[in-house]
Image (spheres, rainbow, N blue to C red):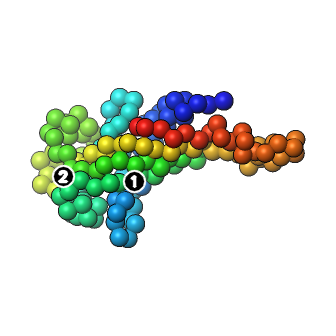
């Protein structure tokens, strides 16, 4: 039986292995999200995203801090997350240096000095995390006269990230 801390630890481990999320602004009129590669240090947030200044997400932020949502699906589709927080531009040179790698460099022609380079910071506050429930397992549970939703409750965590 997993508890919230176990599910959260699993989330950070999976995100490190497959760091791709769909990121968007909560108040955006079109509800548009876009794929972004999350970077983070240690075993928790904040989450960082490198983007170009002409990215539609940055343009929609209009230089202000915004409420944002990121959704995540683990590589094996056995963990899902809905993450909420505050998104802002954070072009701190020391943070850029720590997070910079060959994958990021491939997107910026002039490297760290590229005038389009922008670093976004998502300060996470809450998240709902789900471990995948097997349909086969649910069917077997029902065969034994039990409600599969009762056992699935242990696979959901509401956490503060």
User: Going 23% across and 53% down the picture, which residue do you hit?
Assistant: 65
Which one is in front in this view, the residue at disc 2 or the one at disc 1?
1
Location of residue 81 in the rendering, given as x and y in whole percent from the top left corner: 50, 47
Picture quadrant of residue 62: bottom left
- Residue farthest right in this picture: 144
Q: Nearer the viewer, residue 158 or 121?
A: 158
Q: Is residue 136 visible?
A: yes
Mark 2 → mark 1, Cα distance in angstroms = 22 Å
Residue annotated with mark 1: 69
Picture quadrant of residue 34: bottom left
Left or right: residue 74 versus residue 35 is right
Left or right: residue 77 versus residue 161 is right
User: Going 14% across and 39% down the picture, which residue do you hit?
Assistant: 93
Element class at badge 2: strand
Q: Nearer the viewer, residue 65 or 139?
A: 65
User: Do the residues bearing badges 2 and 1 touch, measured as CB atoms within 8 Å?
Assistant: no
Location of residue 50 in the rendering, given as x and y in whole percent from the top left corner: 26, 49
Q: State the quadrant of the N terminus.
A: top right
Location of residue 68 in the rendering, given as x and y in whole percent from the top left corner: 35, 54
Vertical placement of residue 4 versus 145, above or below: above
Q: State the quadrant of the C terminus.
A: top left
User: Going 23% across and 34% down the picture, which residue do you hit?
Assistant: 98
10 Å crowding of disc 1: few (<14), some (14-19), many (20+): many
Q: How many numbered callouts?
A: 2
Q: Nearer the viewer, residue 92 or 150?
A: 150
Residue annotated with mark 2: 117
Name which of mark 2 and mark 1 comes first in the sequence. Answer: 1
């Amino acid at each position: 039986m997993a508890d919230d801390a176990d599910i959260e630890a699993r989330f950070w481990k999976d995100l490190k292995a497959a760091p791709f999320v769909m990121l968007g602004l909560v108040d955006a009129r079109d509800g548009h999200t876009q794929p972004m590669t999350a970077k983070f240090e240690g075993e928790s947030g904040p989450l960082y995203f490198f983007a170009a200044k002409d990215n539609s997400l940055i343009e929609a932020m209009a230089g202000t801090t915004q409420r944002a949502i990121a959704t995540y699906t683990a590589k094996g589709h056995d963990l899902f997350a809905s993450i909420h927080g505050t998104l802002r531009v954070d072009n701190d040179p020391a943070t850029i240096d720590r997070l910079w790698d060959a994958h990021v460099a491939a997107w910026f022609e002039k490297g760290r000095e590229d005038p389009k380079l922008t670093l976004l910071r998502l300060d996470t506050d809450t998240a709902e995390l789900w471990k995948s429930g097997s349909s086969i397992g649910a069917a077997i549970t029902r065969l034994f006269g039990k409600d599969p939703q009762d056992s699935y409750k242990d696979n959901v965590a509401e956490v503060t990230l």
